Every structure is written in structure tokens, then in C-alpha cells.
Image (cartoon, helix red, strand yellow):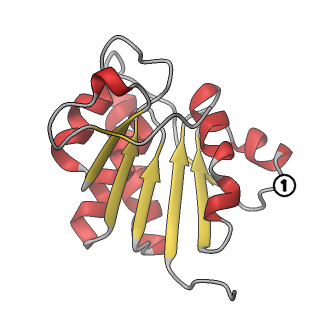
Amino acid sequence: MGKDTTRVLAVASGGGHWEQLMLLRSTLARYDIRFATTEPAMALQHGITEPESLPDCNQNMPLRSALCALVALRIVLKHRPQVILSTGAAPGFFCILAGRLIGARTLWIDSVANGEELSLCGKLAKRFAHECWTQWEHLAQGPSPRYFGAVL
């Protein structure tokens, strides 16, 4: 089967979010894939050349979050992905928001670490992303988030 020309932007913060995204890498390999992360060195360690770099941020860093949102918009406008997916956290959410502005399809996969409730970004993503998935069956509620199993 040939390579699919669908442009995909896969986004994750460093640490566990990135590791979960990397577990999806073989599934994404058939697409025209670009990666963005807060830890470009981790991407390079996985053999990903030219990863896009996003500033790390969270709800307690309003100025840094604003900067991250602008960088996310720049990355999305640069690559014009047709699909954006993120395993978290805030930088991935900002890419999903930017993707909605250009008409990209968006998917949020909440971290497996959030077993009691959706993360803050997951709660926001379920309102803005086309699809929001949880890795915990008991957190699936109505149409969103949905459960299809765990990445890990």
C-alpha cells in the first residue's frame, strides 16, 4: 500500500504525553506526518528529523501560554495539516484550536495518567476537538469523550 498524502500534525508535550504519541507512530507512518513537541531533543532521539518546537506552558503561566498559542498558530499555518492529533498537554490543545481555524480535523487523546477524570485540557478539548478520546472506559460519557482502548 502506498503512502497516504494526508498531512498530519502530531503534537505532544514531553514526558509521558510524548511517549504515548510515540506508541501511535507506526499507525501514523503511512501519512505525511510532522511532529511538534516541547522537547525536540526527545523527538531527535526517536529519529524524528526537524521536529517543530513549542514552548512548554500550563494554566499557571498565562504569558507563556499566550506565547505557546502564537507559536502553535505559526506551526499550523506553516504546515497546513489536514488532521491534528495530540496526546496532551496545553501546547497540543493550542495546536488543535489553531487547526480548527484552518478547517483541520482534530483529535485529542487524553493521557492514560488521567484515570480519575479528564485533564483540564481534555475537558476543554472535548468542546473544541472534533474527537476527544479517553484511555479509561469509565470516563467515556455520551458522545465525548469516547473510549477505544488504551495506547499503553
Q: Which residue was labeled with disc 1?
A: 47
- The image shows a total of numbered marks equal to 1
Residue 133 visible within the image = yes
In this view, the residue in front, 108 or 136, is: 136
Quadrant including the N terminus: bottom right
The x, y position of residue 152, in whole percent, is 62, 31
Q: Is residue 127 above or below residue 34?
A: above
The x, y position of residue 63, in whole percent, is 33, 29
Q: Is residue 133 above or below residue 25?
A: above
The x, y position of residue 95, in whole percent, is 38, 52
Identified at 68% across, 67% down, the residue is: 29
Q: Inspect the image, locate mark 1, and give the three-letter code of the amino acid beneath it.
A: Gly
Identified at 47% across, 61% down, the residue is: 75
Residue 119 visible within the image = no
User: Where, by quadrant of the figure, is residue 83 drawn?
Assistant: bottom left
Q: Is residue 128 above or below residue 111?
A: below
